[in-house]
Image (spheres, rainbow, N blue to C red):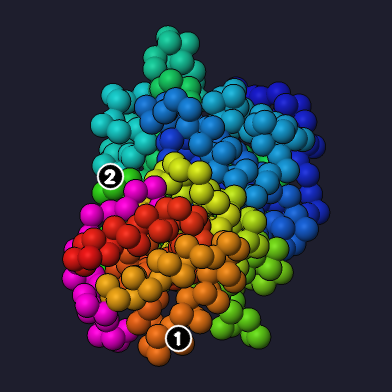
Amino acid sequence: MSMDMKYFEEMEAKIPHGKVRTRFAPSPTGYMHVGNLRTALYTWLIARANNGTFILRIEDTDQGRYVDGAVDVIYRTMAQCGLTHDEGPDVGGPVAPYIQSERRDTYGKYARLLVEKGGAYYCFCEKTESEEDSGDFNRAADPCRDLSAEEVQEKLSAGMPYVIRQKIPTEGTTTFHDAIFGDITVENSTLDDQVLLKRDGLPTYNFANVIDDHLMGITHVVRGSEYLSSAPKYNLLYESFGWEVPTYVHCSPVMRDSQNKMSKRHGDPSYEDLIAQGYLTEAVLNYVALLGWSPKGEQAEQEIFSLDELVKAFDMTGISKSPAIFDRVKLDHFNAVYLRNLPADAFHKVAEPYIRQSVKGDFDTAAIAALLQARCERLTDIPEKVDFFDALPAYDVECFTNKKSKTNSEVSLAMLQAAVPALEALSDWTVDGIHDTLIDLAAKLEVKNATLMWPVRIAAAGKLVTPGGAVEICHILGKGETIRRLKAGMTMLGA
Ligand code: GLU
C-alpha cells in the first residue's frame, strides 16, 4: 500500500510560513452566538495585533446540521463587525478551498497516509451509534486495530464499508500546552480511538480541523474550551504526522448565568438578535471583547475600546480561564455610552428608523433625535419614548400635580391660561424664542420656572416622562399644535 508522496509534498509546499496565521472556523448553523462572535473577535485580534493573516474557514462536514443561508449569516456578521478576513471561501487564498466539504479528497488522502504512518487504522465493524462521538467504542475489543495489511486490503477489495479510526497508544500519557490553561497531561488509556474518516468518506471535525490547521499554516488555534478535552488526541495526530503543533488558545464559555452556557435553544440572543434589539455593533463588540479578556497596565481600568484600540491593547495573556457571564445591564450601559458618544448626525441616522416607527407626522426627526441621544440605552427604546408627537395620549389630570414643581390642578390651569396668550403672541417659534417667553412669563408671574414648565410639558406631551423639556417639545410640535394641546389641557383642568 505504498503511497505516491508527491501530492503531500505539493500540499506542504503551499503552506505559508513566517507570519502569524489565525482562523475562525464556524460551522454554518445559521446563528452566530455571542461566544462565537467573541472567538471570531479574539482570533481576528491575535492576527491583527501581530500583523498576521486572518482566515475564514467554513466547517460544514456535519451535513446533518446544514442550514440554508447559514454561510451568509457568517459573512454578514463578520463584515458588519469589521472583522475582515484575508483568506476565505469568498476571497480565495494560497491554501484554498476554505470550505471543508470542498476538501473531501484531501482528508481521505491524509487519513490513508496516517494509516501508513501507524497512527490510524481501518475499522470494518458495524456502525457505531454515533460516529462523531465514538466515546463508547471499546477499543480493546476492536478486532480491526491489529489487522494485517493484507487482511485490510482483502476487505477493501471486497468493498466492505469502513471508517478510519485514530490509533491511540494504549499506554503512557500525552501532554499538551494551552496558552491560557498551561500544560495538561492525560493518560492515553482514557482517550478513545475516535473516528477520523466516516463511512461516507467525510472527515469528522476532530480530524478535519487538524488537517486544515496544518495545511493552512495556522499558528494559533483559538476556540471554545469545549475542545480542550480533545486536544490530546489532536496532539497525537500532529505527532503521528510529524507536524508542528500550533499554539492552542482555548477560551472559556460565555454563560447566561452561573450554571448555564448561553444557548440558542434557551432563546439567548445571537449577534443579529442583539442588533435587532437595538444595540450598536461597536458596543456589542466592545462588550464582548471584555467578556473573558481584560486589558493590563495603564489600560487596566479602561472600558471603552474601539476596534483599533483593541488591536493595540489586545494581548492573549489577558484572556481569562473562568467562564464569563453575559450581563444585559452591562451591555445596556456600553450601548448607552456608544449612543451618547456618536456625532449628532450619526445618532440621527441610526435613530431615525426607530423614531419613524411611532412618529409618522411631519416633525423634525433631527430635533427629536437630539432629545433622545443622552436618554436611551437601546434604539428599540425610542418608539415608545416619542409616540406622543403624533398623537396626544389620553392622560390623567393627576399628571398636572407635582410637588417638586409646586403644581396642582389649580396652579396648572393658571399657568396654562397665562402661557397660551404669551406663546400665541410669539412670532419667532425657535427654541430660544419659546424659552425666553416662558422664562419671562414665570418671572412676571413670580413663580419658579418649574411651576410654569411642568404643566406646559404635561399638556404638550400628555406624558409624565418625556425626553426633553417643555421648550424642546413645544418647538418640535410647532406653534399651532402646541396651542391646541395647551388649550386641551385647560379644558381638562376645568376651564
Ligand atoms: N467548527 C467548530 C465550531 O463551530 C470550530 C472549532 C474550532 O475553531 O476548531 O465550534
The residue at 46%/70% (across/down) is 422
The residue at 23%/70% (across/down) is 399
The amino acid pointed to by label 1 is Lys
Q: In x, y percent, where is residue 65?
A: 38, 31
The amino acid pointed to by label 2 is Arg
Residue 401 in the magenta stretch? The answer is yes
**Circle 2 crowding by C-alpha within 10 Å: few under 14, some 14–19, many from 20:** few
Bounds of the magenta segment: 389-411
Residue 356 in view, yes or no: yes
The residue sitting at the bottom extreme is: 446
Q: Mark 1 points at which residue?
A: 444
Q: In x, y percent, where is residue 296?
A: 61, 81
The residue sitting at the top extreme is: 158
Q: Mark 2 points at which residue?
A: 265
The residue at 51%/65% (across/down) is 425
Is residue 416 rendered to the left or right of residue 336?
A: left
**Circle 1 crowding by C-alpha within 10 Å: few under 14, some 14–19, many from 20:** few
Quick one: 153 or 165, which is closer to the camera? 165
Is residue 394 rendered to the left or right of residue 180?
A: left
Asked which secondary structure carries label 1, the reply is helix
Instruction: Determine which quarter of the picture holds residue 414.
Output: bottom left
Q: In which quarter of the image is the C terminus?
A: bottom left
Quick one: 425 or 320, which is closer to the camera? 425
Quick one: 48 or 81, which is closer to the camera? 81
Q: Nearer the viewer, mark 2 or mark 1?
A: 1
Q: Magenta stretch mostly in which secondary structure?
A: loop
Compared to residue 356, the image places residue 179 above or below, namely below
